[in-house]
Image (cartoon, rainbow, N blue to C red):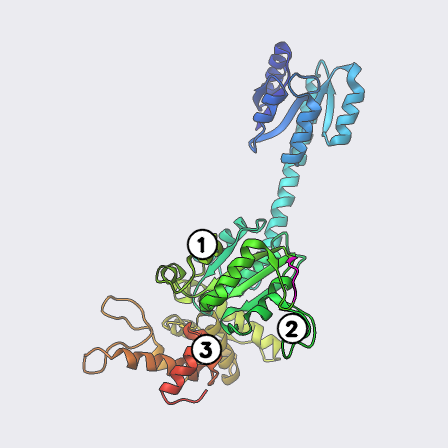
Amino acid sequence: MNILIADDEPSILKLHTHMVQELGYSPVLASDGEDAIKKLTPEIRAVLLDIKMPEKDGLEVLEYARKNFSELPVIMVTALYDLDMAVKAIKMGAFDYLTKPLDFDRLSTVLRNALDLSNLKEEVTELQDKLRQSELFSDIVGESEKVNEVFELVNRVLETDINVMIIGESGTGKELVAKALHQGSKRREGPFIAVNCSAITSELAESLLFGHKKGSFTGATEDRAGYFEQADKGTIFLDEIGDMELEIQAKVLRILEEKKVRRVGEKEERPINFRVISATNHDLSKAATENKFRKDLYFRLEEYPIYLPPLRERKEDLPLLAQYFLKEFCESNNISPKRFSKNAIQSMAQYSWPGNIRELKNVVRRTAVRVNTDLIDEVEFGKFEEKSRVEEDESGTATGVKTRSTNGEFTPLDEIEKQAIEKAYLHSDRNAAEAAKLLGISRATMYRKLKQFGYES
């Protein structure tokens, strides 16, 4: 263990160095206060600090240590006539004080106690961090390497205000990660405002995002704070940001840059303080290159990207997820406990899960209702199960959609698209909005395709 010894008298420094080495510790030496501050690093486990030193005295070094290394035990070393200064140091947070000349046994006892207390505090902090993490990620089930990578990325930015963009397919749990980022941040006591960007039209954008004054337009019967103002001192989550219209993107960029909002019908601007977390299932870098998404907004939002893997890339989590959802559903609906057989798990592992976690949850619930036995051996995937099994195209990529017809020729793209639309629509019990989420397209596109293929939403 490294012990920092700070003293401006060479003979004293040499003596204390020898004593620390005799006790089995590794000394790090500093000849004045400035030098001591420079050598204060996370590798230092305790400090022997002389009170009277040039450049900066011991009290100044102590103050710096308490501010930057709050758990580091600092032991003041002083002459008998400076006991008042030693008492002052104790009040400032010093662990203890020793008087010159140092008694070897006393030094041994004080250092051992200081290090024991420091180790105990570290263990408590570690346990608190683990407890906090388990609480933050309680709704995100998984033990795979890819899920743990997500946890690590989230942990790195919890205490910052950096803008985070969560990238992943529909149904991968982007909002759960956004909520974990908020709950673990310094803004946790503030509001978490989730905004579905695909549902905001250009006509309503200013009112919804920035708010309005009573009487500012027909239907404005009362003052209303917009989403950004509602997120003051908290977090605003811009979900499906890739579906936001270009005209609205310009307005969002302005408020991100100025951190001020003016309600429709008002003249004055209101300062607001918020953190932005956005989510998308689109390749926004490509969209920005093609001028389908504003480049300046893209670079503003994607300060720190977090990629969520689809379920097909983390299938080692599938048994845990399936049993978790099954247990949750049975308990909340007074259904006798059930479990999946190995055969059922293998069957699920062969499926492509285009709807990801959301689809798995639906399949588990449907199966739990339809199967009467406690051991579930067959899974109720739905009417279009045969079209959804994992198959491989020419490149060997799992697609989950048949790309060849029975005679060996390639299936036309419009037929593949129709299969996907039908599958998602019927799988979602004819809920167009839910089907759009499964496919990662906007609701407007879903409605148009349903009409094209002869369905009514």
Marks 2/1: CA–CA distance = 34 Å
Q: Would you say the magenta stretch is mainly helix, strand or loop? A: loop
Q: Name the residue at 45% across, 54% down.
A: 299
Frontmost of labels 2 and 3 is 2
In the rendered image, which residue does mark 1 sit on?
A: 299
Q: Of residues 19 and 199, which is closer to you in this image? A: 199
User: Which portion, as a residue range, is magenta?
Assistant: 266-270
SS assignment at label 2: loop
Q: Quadrant of residue 347?
A: bottom left
Q: Is residue 344 left or right of residue 264?
A: left
Whole-percent x and y of residue 131? 62, 53
Badge 2 local density, few (<14 within 10 Å), some, or many (20+)?
A: some
For residue 216, the mark is 2
Residue hosting label 3: 443
Label 3 near label 2: C-beta < 8 Å?
Answer: no
Q: Residue 444, image x and y in percent?
A: 44, 78
Residue at 59% x, 15% y is 18
Residue 382 rendering spot, x and y as whole percentages: 42, 83
